[in-house]
Amino acid sequence: MQYWPDDVLETAEALNGNRQDQELTMKASLHWPSTLAACFAAALLLCSAAALQAAPRQAHAAARKSAPPTHVLHLTAVKLEDSGWTDQRVLSILRSAGRILARCGVKLERVELVSLAVPPSYLDLATPETQRTLARDYSVARPAVYFVHEARSSPASETEAFGRGNSQPALADTVWITLAARNPVIALAHELAHVLMDSAEHSEEPGNLMRDRTAPKNTTLTPAQCARLRDTATRNGLLKKASSKTS
């Protein structure tokens, strides 16, 4: 894996900012070796304002109500090749989910987009072992979101989140989302909140993001939920305090 120097990485603008012409992501293309023992990558800088267009209405509404950023979030997005996901859709969903989290003063500042070629048997959510193998043999910075094809587990789940208290410690701080996920923006924001709060708790409050079923109208978080999200994620190293230059 090639790493960009600090002076390059520090130029990355927030995905939910107003200056789309300066928005940057990092993209790496990788190939899964037959031994499943190691992976290699060639990284390149992807400047794509066009890929970050068109957010759903609910995400725009969330952005209008967002708090001034007090914390910043850096995410790794792992897109499995041949899963059906495109770079543009991945980045659009991430950006829109970031606008929902912005209500808590959390700014999605940077995304590292990784494209990973895997055998067909690894394209789906089949077993925890499959997920552990992917996470083990190709290690990325976390929190990380894995964009996979479909769910083949029983019972099938369109999205999954793994916190640090989960029974799968090797998958801690990861979110997994399938191509068929309903309300993908809301679902991703919901699962990211689970990871950042390190909690599997749901809310019964109408319109709350953490209701057990995602819906377009469920986008709000309470002040107490936001405080828990920021405090827990900062303590776990998943968020950083915003600098004075963060807008």
Image (cartoon, rainbow, N blue to C red):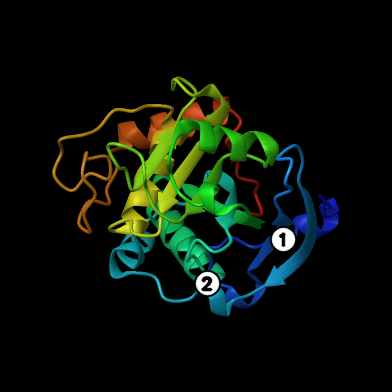
Question: What type is the residue that disc 1 sits on?
Answer: Ser
Residue at numbered disc 2 = 88
Residue at 49%, 24% (x, y): give it. Answer: 168
Please provide percent x and percent y for residue 200. Answer: 33, 28
Q: Residues within 10 Å of mark 1 (few under 14, many from 20)?
A: some
Residue 2 spot, x, y in % from top left: 84, 52
The circle on residue 167 is none
Which quadrant holds residue 229?
top left
Q: Kindly identify the amino acid type of the residue bearing the numbered disc 2.
A: Gln
**Residue ID at (53%, 65%):** 17
Mark closest to the chain's N terminus, 2 or 1:
1
Tell me how far mark 2 sits from mark 1, CA to CA: 15 Å
Q: Residue at x 82, y 55 (%)?
A: 4
**Residue tagged 1:** 29
Q: Nearer the viewer, mark 2 or mark 1?
A: 1
Please indicate, yes or no, whether residue 1 appears anywhere in the rendered image.
Answer: yes
The quadrant the C terminus occupies is bottom right
Of 223 and 52, the residue lying toward us: 52
| Residue 225 appears left or right of 25 | left
Give the SS element for disc 2. Answer: helix
User: Where residue 177 appears, x then y in whole percent?
Assistant: 42, 50
